[in-house]
Amino acid sequence: MNNTEKVIKEIKEFHTDIEAWFRGKEDQESLYKKLLAGFSTNFKMVNGNNDTITLASFSEWLPGAYAQFPDRSIVLENIEVHTTESHGLASYVEIQTTGSTVTRRKSSAVFVISEERAFWLHLIEKWI
């Protein structure tokens, strides 16, 4: 698998897993570990409200969101990836639908790539 494929795989798997988390569809403990395993310890995110979230604060937030949105679906569009030997830069649109509420965000992310996978390092989301 090349580095572009590693980044795309990580993006798609994370969003599949976070949708399952919101819906409460899988074992909470194992899914929690799987979700966090994809992040660099230095991960930071700037969300659509312009709040900065660290990996520690994200991991503390997750348990309260488990099974809170049983009908939420997440769709990804327009994934674009550029990579070097050890990093990836991706952009994509994320669409979350919960009942009749639809939110859209344009995201850009930096990944650190090891031999076996890509790890989230930085994520910026903008509401669209």
Image (spheres, rainbow, N blue to C red):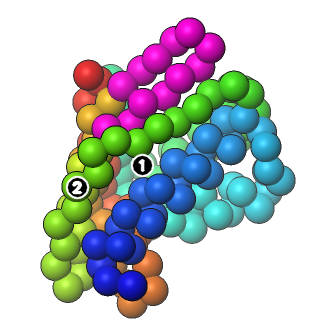
Q: From what the image shows, is residue 101 above or below residue 26?
A: above
Q: Nearer the viewer, residue 12 or 57?
A: 12
Q: In this view, does 100 lie to the left or right of 103?
A: right
Mark 2 = which residue? 80
Report whether 22 appears left or right of 116.
right
Residue at the spot of label 1: 54
The amino acid sitting under disc 1 is Thr
> Bounds of the magenta span?
93-104
Q: Which of marks 1 and 2 is in front?
A: 2
Q: How far is disc 1 from disc 2 in space, using C-alphas?
A: 24 Å
Quadrant in the picture for residue 30: bottom right
4, 113: nearer the viewer = 4
Above or below 69: residue 80: below
Name the quadrant containing residue 50. Answer: top left
Outermost residue, top side: 100
Q: Position of residue 103 (x, y in %)?
A: 42, 20
Q: Which residue is drawn at 38% across and 74% down?
A: 6
Residue 59 in sight from this viewpoint: no
Secondary structure category for the residue under label 2: strand
Return the x and y of residue 15 as percentages of the image width and height. Answer: 52, 48
Q: Judging from the image, what secondary structure is the residue with disc 1 in?
A: strand
Camera-side residue of 63 and 17: 17
Looking at the image, the residue that sits furthest to the bottom is: 115
What type is the residue that disc 2 sits on? Glu
Residue at image coords 58%, 50%: 16
Query: Does the magenta run of residues contain 95?
Result: yes
Q: Residue 103 in magenta?
A: yes
How far across and down, in percent of the image, does residue 116 sit?
45, 86
